[in-house]
Image: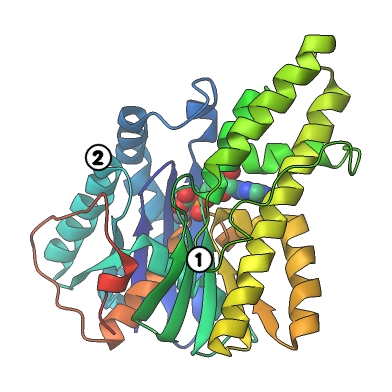
Amino acid sequence: MRILGIETSCDETGVAVYDSEQGILADALYSQIDLHAEYGGVVPELASRDHVRKLLPLIDEVMQRAACAKTELDAIAYTAGPGLVGALMVGASVAKSLAFAWGIPAVAVHHMEGHLLAPLLEDPAPQAPFIALLVSGGHTQLVNVEAIGRYEILGESLDDAAGEAFDKTAKMLGLGYPGGPAIARAAEQGTPGRFQFPRPMVDRPGLDFSFSGLKTFTLNTRDDCAGQADLNSQDVADIAWAFQDAVVDTLALKCRRALRQTGARQLVVAGGVSANRLLRQRLAEMVAKEKAEVFYPQLRYCTDNGAMIAFAGYQRMLAGSDPDLKVQVRARWPLSELQG
Ligand code: KG4
Ligand code: ZN
């Protein structure tokens, strides 16, 4: 089976062709980071307009690079949510229109299921049942994956998502957007232990997260530093180090708790924050002690991309998803509502 995947839920236009025998044949990504950088975050209206400009040329390019004729496609998968409604509508309308013209089904994909399944494109791939830690700009969730399509949310963030906390903290420290990579870079020059940040909610049972307190802690630490003199680049690096250490430690601790609680021996980590090197290092140490294994997507499939949508669309086709011609997208969409 061959699937064209289209991702437009936020600030990345992603397109890929997945072949069930050969894997990803071609994929391309256009990032709008430069467009939004001067505003310090994503401007939804600008995002939609840019998807309109970029999507069709990107589809054309990917189809050519995959040496795939439109007659060879079996379906078109698109992100139907969660995400920015205007941005989602661009991908959904293009996918539905092309599918209608080419006489093939259009398959609605849940963006977080796309992230969750991305590690299955790798070799070796995890095999359900497993635990998934989804850490992106909009979500932080621990999911019990009983089978592909059967998802039980074990815990999630009660306020900011991990990626969002990175982005907001970076903004407070005058680092660029997106904040995750900027904090990680600054933290490389940081002094370990100069600041000690709290580990939110680790002393309570359960698998939920809360990251908004860390933001306040960053703000107070920054203002304390700035009160003495100008905030210099070493202060920024030291705060970035302490913040990253606290987030990563908290995520690792909750993952260990989820593994112990469920008895699962495989952990899948996906979403933009799964690109974080310190997180990968801490999780490697944790799973080694727990005699478990951890799986990631390759780095370019950690953040938003078309490949994960094409692959999730393929899984939806196998599960007998029922396509129609209505263009419907959802800003909010609980992962647990999906059916296997
Ligand atoms: O999955 P993603 O591309 O988009 C959403 O679905 O939200 O995730 C983007 C998030 C941003 O918040 C970004 O700051 C974060 O992932 N991120 C990172 C790193 N790379 C991206 N966070 C920490 N460390 C990184 N290396
Ligand atoms: Zn995402």
Q: Secondary structure at mark 1?
A: strand
- Residue shown at the point (65%, 26%) measured from the top left: 219
Q: Nearer the viewer, residue 253 or 58?
A: 253
Q: Quadrant of residue 50?
A: top left
Residue 177 makes an appearance in the image: no
Q: Earlier in the sequence, mark 2 or mark 1?
A: 1
Amino acid beneath label 1: Ala
Where in the figure is residue 329, as x and y percent of width and height?
A: 20, 54
Circle 1 is placed at which residue position? 26
Q: Residues within 10 Å of mark 1 (few under 14, many from 20)?
A: many
Q: Nearer the viewer, residue 201 or 79?
A: 201
317 in relation to 108, above or below: below
Q: Quadrant of residue 113?
A: bottom left
- Tag 2 near tag 1, CB within 8 Å: no
Quadrant position of the C terminus in the picture:
bottom left
Quadrant position of the N terminus in the picture:
bottom left
Residue 203 makes an appearance in the image: yes
Which residue is outermost to the front? Answer: 204
Where in the figure is residue 138, as x and y percent of width and height?
A: 44, 49
- Residue shown at the point (62%, 84%) measured from the top left: 260
Circle 2 is placed at which residue position? 86
47 in relation to 274, above or below: above
Q: Secondary structure at mark 2?
A: helix
